[in-house]
Image (spheres, rainbow, N blue to C red):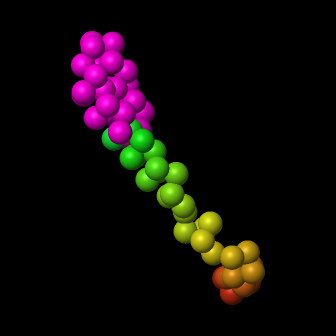
Amino acid sequence: MKTIEYCARAVIQHLNGDFKLFKKYRDMAIKFYEEEKNIVTVGELIPGSTKKKLYEMVS
């Protein structure tokens, strides 16, 4: 959500003619985008064979 927020701020500042603030918000949006795309769930980190063993233990 931070990515969208800073993208919107960047667009508004660009339309207002404040290119310095536009670049700041653009760079922050890119930073948050890079961080968000690296987020994974715990389930994605566990191999399929381990998941199967865990399900068998619980059943």
Instruction: Judge from the rendering whether residue 43 lies leftward or rightward of residue 4; answer left or right.
Output: right
Q: How many marks?
A: 0
In which quarter of the view is residue 49 placed?
Answer: bottom right
Instruction: Judge from the rendering whether residue 19 lies leftward or rightward of residue 39; answer left or right.
Output: left
Magenta span of residues? 1-27
Relative to the observer, which residue lies in front, 8 or 41?
A: 8
Name the dominant secondary structure of the magenta segment: helix
Relative to the observer, which residue lies in front, 58 or 13?
A: 13
From where the camera sits, is residue 17 visible?
yes
At horizontal 28% and vertical 35% (from top left) the residue drawn is 24
Q: Position of residue 55 (x, y in %)?
A: 70, 79
Q: Position of residue 15 (x, y in %)?
A: 33, 13
Task: Specify the quadrant that holds the C terminus.
Answer: bottom right
In which quarter of the view is residue 20 placed?
Answer: top left
Q: Position of residue 9 (x, y in %)?
A: 32, 26
Instruction: Judge from the rendering whether residue 8 lies leftward or rightward of residue 20; answer left or right.
Output: right
In which quarter of the view is residue 12 placed?
Answer: top left
User: Which residue of the protein is positioned furthest toward the front in this rendering?
Assistant: 20
From where the camera sits, is residue 59 visible?
no
- Tell me if residue 16 is in the magenta stretch: yes
Task: Specify the quadrant that holds the N terminus.
Answer: top left
Q: Position of residue 17 (x, y in %)?
A: 27, 14
At horizontal 30% and vertical 26% (from top left) the residue drawn is 22
- Tell me if residue 18 is in the magenta stretch: yes
Relative to the observer, which residue lies in front, 5 or 10?
A: 10
Instruction: Judge from the rendering whether residue 8 lies leftward or rightward of residue 37; answer left or right.
Output: left
At horizontal 60% and vertical 71% (from top left) the residue drawn is 45
At horizontal 40% and vertical 46% (from top left) the residue drawn is 32
